[in-house]
Image (spheres, rainbow, N blue to C red):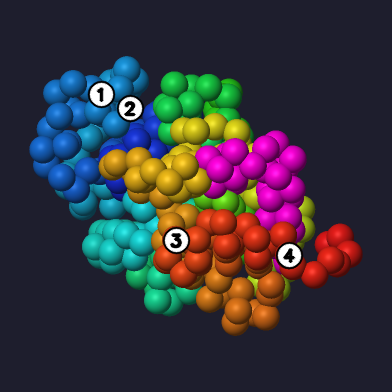
Amino acid sequence: MPSFNSVAVIGAGAWGTALAGVAARAGRDVVLYARDAAHAAHIIAARENPRLPGVRLAADITVTTDLALAGRADIILIATPAQHLRGAANVLAPYLAKGTPIIACAKGIERGTHKFMTEVIAEAAPHATPAILSGPGFADDVARGLPTAVTLAAHDEALASALVQALGSSTFRPYHSTDIRGVEIGGAAKNVLAIAAGIAVGRKLGASALAALTTRGFSELVRLGHACGARSETMAGLSGLGDLILTCSNQQSRNFALGIALGRGEAPPPGKLAEGEFTAPVLIELAVSKNIDMPVSSAVAAILNGAVTIDAAIEGLLTRPFKAEG
């Protein structure tokens, strides 16, 4: 297994900048790629990303708009939103050496194709090696070096282990896995369930309702995961249940915040992208294709597209036939 001395992060948003700091703390040579020249210039001049105020960028992180420079790194982390991953991998592909690991750092399913993130990478950059990073972590916590644990999955266990060794540090602990699909489903479905949890909080349905919604929603996630070949222990770990618990306990989550706004009858928070909003309809399409019942996720999708009101969705969930646990 080759040594991984250099890391490039594609996407200079809050999460990408936080991950650049992770790689720097792990002792790697780090390049942070920003598509927008003005944004890159601001970060270079201030050594701070305006999307992470108060967090100083490590002096040895190189900020660039040169995609060729980023493409020469031993490891590539793509930290763009899920629906932009294909475009980022497409433009990056010509600059990559064969077998370069590309780690998707977004949680979602591609609209139109129903492809998971590693599948998108495999199509857009076929000579690279796809991997996925997911789990409970907020950009601000990670950027400030607060303790965080995540899951990193690749098809080859030796590669997954080597990537973990290259990125891990005393404050950022990745666990490696070969269950790529479990990690991807855990991250993607969690975003949709976080919107449901936010709606419950915004509607002031109470702690009992929130707990029931969270656990029933997680059972949906597990059912879909099994149908797609995922392993139970992965979905019950950091990328599934752990991520869901964190998201539903902290209003830093964009998906949770969107749900709260919907529950209150307010406009969504400005300037914030909630991946679950894009994932919800695709998740339901995938579930239908697998003949998997996902009532909580289906209710979220219907609320988001205006097919039902929140009150009607709640009534529909509460009047479903009684059934056994599972």
Say which label, 1 or 3, has the lower sequence index: 1
Q: Which amino acid does label 1 sit on?
A: Glu
Point out which mark residue 319 bears: 4
Which span of residues is magenta-colored?
A: 197-223
Say which label, 4 or 1, has the lower sequence index: 1
* Residue at 39% across, 39% down: 15
| Residue identifier under label 2 | 52
Could you tell me residue 324's position as x and y percent? 89, 64
Point out which mark residue 115 bears: none
Say which label, 4 or 2, has the lower sequence index: 2
Give the crowd class for mark 2: few <14, some 14-19, many >=20 residues within 10 Å: some
Work out how far the residue at label 4 is from the one at label 1, CA to CA, in angstroms: 51 Å
Q: Nearer the viewer, residue 99 or 119?
A: 119
Above or below, 210 against 132 in this view is above
Q: Which amino acid does label 3 sit on?
A: Leu
Work out how far the residue at label 4 is from the one at label 3, CA to CA, in angstroms: 21 Å
Secondary structure beneath disc 2? loop
**Is label 4 in contact with label 2 (beta carbons under 8 Å)?**
no
Could you tell me residue 22's position as x and y percent? 45, 31
The nearer-to-camera label among 4 and 3 is 4
* Residue at 42% across, 65% down: 306
**Is label 1 in contact with label 2 (beta carbons under 8 Å)?**
yes
Q: Does the magenta stretch include residue 201?
A: yes
Above or below, 101 against 257 in this view is below
Work out how far the residue at label 4 is from the one at label 2, CA to CA, in angstroms: 44 Å
Q: Does the magenta stretch include residue 36?
A: no
Give the main secondary structure, helix, strand or loop, of the magenta stretch. helix
